[in-house]
Image: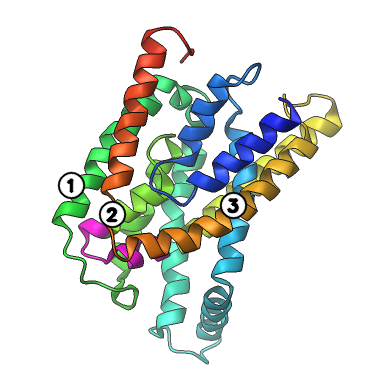
Amino acid sequence: MTWIQAAFLGLIQGLTEFLPISSSAHLRIVGALLPDVADPGAAFTAIIQLGTEAAVLVFFWRDIVRIIRAWFGSLRGRVPREDPDARMGWLVILGSIPIVVLGLLFQDAIESSLRNLWIVATTLVVFGVILAVADAVARHVRTLDQLTYKHGLYYGLAQSLALIPGVSRSGGTITAGLLMGYTREAAARYSFLLAIPAVFGSGFYELYKVVGKHTGGAAEHFSLGQTALATVIAFGIGYLIIGWFLKFISTRSYRAFVWYRIGLGAAVYLLLGFGVISA
């Protein structure tokens, strides 16, 4: 991997992480088209996601600080556990459990067979259609202060589907939120907050393993410097996309993203069928 390729992959990560189109699928597809890259790998993908997730921390800083304070206050009995912010803290923890458990159970498949481009193309199309159905039948009436623990768990199960490239973390959770009757903006906001523990956990875990390989002599096909560059670029672009996306969905449907997913999936099928890229 060259420095220019690393920077380009960071740009792709920043542009796609918060949209319901799967950043991991885009990195996998773009990597297959770049010379001498093929597949950036699950480790590289998880690490540069730290950049986009850092953008979430900055964008929602006041909300996150308020939630953390209320959550710790509820542990000490100073804040009622049913306080909206304290409850949100518990909901994020509850919703993070499924992806942690499933990520550990299926780690080998996530890093190998599930990155097959035939699977990626299929999940892009199938979950694009599911998103279209969810957006069409959604009632758009529930707000985040109406989020229940049962719904928080459902959100978490939907997020865990994003372990398969092509599903999309935001796409899966937003789809679940729409099906449960939440507004587009509420579903997106909770999706962003819910991703924080999972992304930072997997990102720092993969970073720890990669640093160990580099210092121990068994290096990856990308350098730590290249990874850092991609992560910084992903942070800057991702921060801009969050604000744009929240404004976009406040007045428009997800139809454009649905058609994009289907078109991209079809394009990957064609590229695979004609032997332009390898699965």
Of tags 1 and 3, the one toward the viewer is 3
Circle 3 sits in a helix, a strand or a loop, which is it? Answer: helix
Does residue 132 belong to the magenta stretch? Answer: no
- Residue beneath disc 2: 176
Label 1 to label 2, Cα distance in Å?
11 Å
Is 247 drawn above or below residue 114 in the view shown? Answer: below
Label 1 to label 3, Cα distance in Å?
29 Å
Q: Give the magenta part as a residue range.
A: 178-189
Does residue 183 belong to the magenta stretch? Answer: yes
Side (left or right) of 193 relative to 42: left
Query: Where does residue 193 sit, x and y in percent of width and height?
Result: 48, 63
Query: Where does residue 78 sit, x and y in percent of width and height?
Result: 52, 92
Q: Does the magenta stretch mainly form a helix, a strand or a loop?
A: helix
At a point 52% along the width and 24% down the height, the residue shown is 112
- Give the amino acid at mark 1: Val
Is 46 drawn above or below residue 263 in the view shown? Answer: below
